[in-house]
Amino acid sequence: MANQNQIDQIAERVERLLVRYAELQRTNALLTQQVDALTQERDTLKSRLGAARARVDALLDRLPEAPAVQKDPS
């Protein structure tokens, strides 16, 4: 009887471990999806930032140069 009780306890623990393992697998899959989505969003934002920088640089290049300001010698 004691052996059967130990076997039942072990079986119960194995079942709980299997349930926990399945939960962890689902959580990992969801986290992987989130990482992929955030990576794609980051890449998109970096691309947009690069394009904006290029536009700002192009606008700066089109600005006329300001005349040199002379300091008053007094």
Image (tube, grey):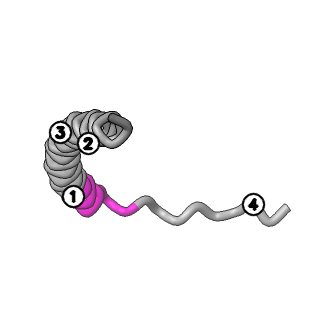
What kind of residue is marked 4?
A: Asp
Marks 3, 1: nearer the viewer: 3
To which residue does mark 4 refer?
72
Q: Secondary structure at mark 2?
A: helix
Of 52 and 38, which appears nearest the observer? 38
Q: Earlier in the sequence, mark 1 or mark 4?
A: 1
Q: Residues within 10 Å of mark 1 (few under 14, many from 20)?
A: few
Specify whether 55 is left or right of 10. Answer: left
Residue at coordinates 28% horizontally, 34% vertically from top-left?
Answer: 8
Are discs 2 and 1 less than 8 Å apart at CB? Answer: no
Total numbered labels placed on residues in the image: 4
What kind of residue is marked 2?
A: Val
To which residue does mark 1 refer?
50
Where in the figure is residue 60, as x and y percent of width and height?
Answer: 29, 57
Q: Earlier in the sequence, mark 3 or mark 1?
A: 3
Residue at coordinates 20% horizontally, 59% vertically from top-left?
Answer: 54
